Image (cartoon, coloured by chain):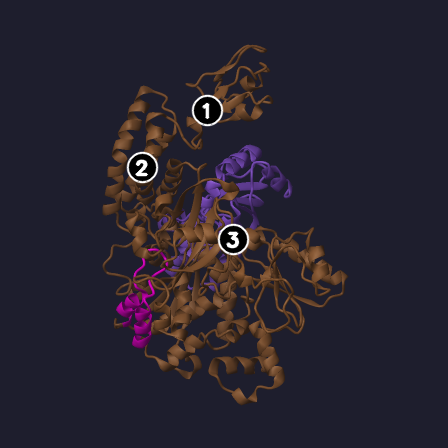
Chain colours: A brown, B purple
């Protein structure tokens, strides 16, 4: 239950009233809600999906045992993800009178030492990430957390609250300026004006295609209809992308506010969030956020006496990648098979249940509150000429610091990977970075200097996509990567249009044939035939498919063919995989000097490809070998090696 | 079946609730049986063929019961790059089932799912919703033994 004091503060923050009535204790509580001060010990646990995966639950248990044993009255708060996945589990401690201090890679073993020092007001030497800036007493020899190398080059708009505030406490969001943009929109602007502001800000869709958001809104805004819909596309299906999940887990109210503003701008009174079932925590947080906003009259009927109605329903996806395509998503909400519809008519004209509908991605909507608050000029001043604002990237793969980064558009890929991401793991050689998931392409070393924006990525055969950056090093085989995406896409192709359904399957078959060993003369011919057709099929699928999924499906193939032709040739002509990934193309050799003739490999070989008498010389018949590597792992004398 | 009947009380019996209803049935029963499909068809006045059509389109729906512990293995890019294929292989070998199947004792089922969004901790798996990070060939046995 909300006490009257908190209610008063919320009114103050939202409606800017009761200004003179704020007493000293009110101000104190406000500072507490803002996170500037604290009246009791607060322990923040980074408990997003990634934090939990790294063991946040165990750490929380260990921490609560510690405080119970030492009779410390502490409050535990689960926060979202600050983006430093590689440093999880992260624990922050906020002591009264001190600034909040953050620790990385906390384990059940080291938590005792860390806490021992913190609770005698000494900053530990190890595991410290940094401290949050505040006017309270600073920890000695501890850096500002935003000076941390991973965070310093970032500009956080969408992620500004993630990992900082309690995501399921609306008071904190409001105290930090939340929902004021929505109130400003419905009180000071007409819907057309809101569309104008967003159009002038230059915001483009963050889901992949990059269509100007304000323009899209205007299409729907000018439609006459008795019902319009607003849909948030949170069906973040791209493998390698998790920024939407982090936003919803860590700051769900931001999304609710963005949706409310979007709905007002186009005149929609009903909204849906279409979210993946694979994100249970995000769904939970979103539900809580919607309930809280409803309770405070931010969602509902006649919001703050403005005459505006707005409601949000959550629709859980059922695991179909194609439903990230907007028209397929509409069919899915309507309870049908998630197959795309031909466009036009565009959803803004005729969408959900035949009514004007706008569909926006999570990250796009999360930018909207700040655009309304600070104006279109402010947003347009960030980024490049045609790509404004920031972009959140999910860094993963063979990179030292995996996690979420938000940088201004126009930052180079090199900066993201090497300055923020810390370069390649184990000092291996960078090979490529795959951007945009199954619809995107690879960026190689020679293109690392290009600035990240919608247009320059297209020039090098990649695309922004949703912003997954999967880094690959010399140990990754690019043909295998293309095969992986093609396998993914052909499974997820909905089957409605022929080019995508058949083309992706054929492309996968070709990639499979060149990554396996030919068994018969026909196989060998097939390999050559296949590679000759691959590019043509890819271009056909690209130009003739119905929806975005098919039109972009060949991108990983075309992009790897363009930049790694040599690697393809090695697979086709020499039947070799230079990175030694494609197991059938691995060549295992027995070193006769080391082989003792123990016969262990002969017994384990699944295809009887190894011959030799016990205690005699052994050899592998290449023709029969399937490259499974069993002999390699079973040999106790290191007598078997992979020929490179 | 009576319990299932009750479940319909929370919904408008309109087409757009078809997927949520199927999801809730699966949550209750663990899978979609032919009987429950028929019941949904009857309640929503949609031909059974169309209910099947929708249910089979989406990866989430299963038509055989799953194990007590459902292992979801992520097949996302980051997990793939860091060796999820060998993890799958090891699970299949260790549990003696293929992906999509349930062990004979009904204890484990193995499922390959789209990216679970824990790319920073790849390769990742989730057992009944509990996420395990940086899984490799060696940790597979240890993870399954936690649930025996």
The CA distance from mark 1 to mark 2 is: 29 Å
In the image, the segment drawn in magenta is A192-221
Quadrant of the image containing the N terminus of chain A? bottom right
Q: Residue at x 56, y 42 (%)?
A: B135
Chain identity of mark 2: A
Q: Residue at x 43, y 53 (%)?
A: A415
Where residue A200 appears, as percent x and y from the top left, is 30, 70
Where residue A31 appears, as percent x and y from the top left, is 58, 76
Residue A402 is covered by the magenta coloring = no
The reply to the same-chain question for discs 1 and 2 is: yes
Question: In the shown orientation, is residue B95 left or right of residue A410?
Answer: right
Specify the farthest residue to the bottom. A20
Q: Element at badge 1?
A: loop
> Which residue position is annotated with label 2?
A507
Badge 2: residue crowd in 10 Å (few <14, some 14–19, many ≥20): many
The quarter of the displayed image where residue A512 is located: top left
Where residue A448 appears, as percent x and y from the top left, is 37, 48
Earlier-in-chain disc, 1 versus 2:
2
**Circles 1, 2 touching at the beta carbon (< 8 Å):** no
Quadrant of the image containing the C terminus of chain A? top left
> Which residue position is annotated with label 3?
B27
Closest to the observer: A65 or A115?
Answer: A115
Closest to the observer: A481 or A422?
Answer: A422
């Amino acid at each position: 239950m909300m006490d009257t004091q908190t209610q008063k503060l919320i009114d103050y923050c939202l409606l800017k009233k009761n200004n003179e009535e704020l007493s000293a204790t009110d101000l104190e509580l406000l500072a507490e809600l803002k996170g500037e001060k604290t009246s009791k010990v607060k322990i923040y646990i980074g408990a997003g999906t990634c934090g939990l995966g790294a063991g946040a639950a165990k750490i929380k248990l260990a921490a609560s045992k510690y405080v119970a044993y030492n009779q410390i009255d502490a409050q535990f708060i689960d926060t979202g993800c600050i983006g430093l996945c590689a440093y999880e589990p992260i624990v922050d401690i906020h002591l009264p009178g001190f600034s909040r201090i953050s620790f990385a890679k906390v384990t059940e073993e080291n938590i005792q030492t860390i806490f021992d020092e913190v609770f005698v007001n000494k900053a530990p030497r190890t595991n410290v990430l940094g401290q949050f800036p505040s006017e309270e007493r600073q920890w000695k020899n501890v850096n500002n957390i935003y000076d941390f190398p991973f965070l310093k080059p970032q500009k956080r708009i969408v992620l500004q609250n993630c990992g900082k505030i309690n995501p399921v406490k609306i008071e904190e969001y409001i105290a930090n300026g939340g929902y004021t943009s929505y109130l400003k929109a419905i009180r000071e602007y007409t819907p057309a004006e809101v569309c104008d502001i967003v159009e002038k800000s230059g915001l483009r869709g963050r889901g992949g295609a990059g269509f100007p958001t304000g323009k899209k809104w205007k299409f729907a805004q000018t439609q006459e209809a008795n019902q319009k819909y607003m849909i948030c596309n949170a069906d973040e299906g791209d493998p390698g992308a998790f920024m939407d999940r982090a936003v919803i887990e860590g700051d769900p109210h931001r999304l609710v506010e963005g949706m409310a503003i979007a709905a007002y701008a186009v005149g929609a009174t009903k909204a849906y969030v279409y979210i993946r079932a694979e994100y249970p925590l995000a769904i939970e947080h979103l539900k809580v956020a919607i309930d809280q906003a409803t309770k405070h009259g931010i969602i509902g009927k006649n919001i703050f006496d403005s005459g505006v109605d707005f409601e949000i329903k959550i629709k859980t996806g059922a695991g179909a990648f194609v439903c990230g395509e907007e028209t397929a998503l509409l069919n899915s909400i309507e309870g049908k098979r998630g197959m795309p519809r031909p466009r036009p008519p565009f959803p803004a004209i005729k969408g959900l249940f035949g009514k004007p509908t706008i569909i926006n991605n999570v990250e796009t909507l999360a930018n909207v509150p700040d655009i309304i608050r600070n104006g279109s000029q402010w947003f347009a001043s960030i980024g490049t000429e045609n790509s404004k604002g920031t972009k959140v990237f999910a860094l993963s793969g063979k990179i030292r610091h995996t996690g979420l980064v938000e940088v201004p558009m126009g930052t180079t890929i090199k900066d993201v990977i090497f300055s923020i991401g810390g370069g390649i793991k184990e000092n291996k050689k960078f090979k490529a970075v795959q951007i945009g998931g199954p619809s995107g392409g690879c960026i190689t070393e020679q293109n690392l200097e290009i600035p990240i924006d919608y247009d320059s990525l297209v020039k090098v055969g990649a695309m922004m996509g949703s912003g997954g950056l999967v880094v690959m090093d010399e140990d990754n085989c690019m043909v295998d990567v293309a095969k992986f995406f093609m396998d993914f896409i052909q499974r997820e192709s909905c089957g409605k249009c022929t080019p995508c359904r058949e083309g992706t399957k054929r492309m996968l078959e070709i990639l499979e044939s060149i990554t396996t060993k030919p068994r018969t003369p026909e196989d060998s011919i097939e390999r050559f035939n296949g590679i000759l057709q691959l590019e043509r099929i890819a271009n056909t699928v690209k130009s003739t498919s119905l929806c975005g999924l098919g039109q972009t499906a060949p991108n990983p193939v075309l992009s790897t063919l363009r930049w790694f032709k040599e690697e393809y040739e090695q697979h086709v002509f020499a039947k070799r995989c230079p990175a030694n990934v494609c197991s059938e193309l691995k060549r295992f050799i027995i070193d006769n000097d080391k082989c003792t003739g123990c016969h262990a490999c002969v017994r384990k070989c699944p295809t009887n490809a190894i011959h030799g008498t016990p205690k005699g010389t052994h050899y592998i018949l290449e023709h029969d070998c399937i490259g499974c590597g069993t002999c390699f792992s079973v040999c106790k004398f290191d007598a078997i090696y992979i020929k490179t | 079946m009576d319990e299932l009947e009750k479940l319909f009380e929370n919904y408008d019996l309109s087409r757009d609730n078809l997927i949520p209803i199927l999801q809730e049935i699966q949550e209750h029963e663990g899978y979609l049986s032919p009987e429950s499909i028929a019941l949904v068809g009857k309640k929503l006045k949609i031909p059974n063929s169309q209910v099947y059509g929708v249910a089979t389109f989406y990866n989430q729906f299963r038509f055989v019961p799953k194990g007590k512990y459902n292992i979801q293995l992520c097949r996302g890019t980051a997990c793939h790059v860091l060796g999820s294929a060998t993890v799958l292989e090891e699970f299949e070998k260790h549990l003696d089932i293929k992906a999509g199947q349930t062990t004979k004792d009904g204890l484990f089922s193995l499922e390959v799912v789209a990216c679970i969004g824990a790319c920073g901790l790849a390769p990742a798996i989730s057992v009944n919703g509990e996420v395990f990070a940086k899984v490799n060939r060696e940790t597979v046995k240890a993870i399954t033994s936690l649930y025996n």
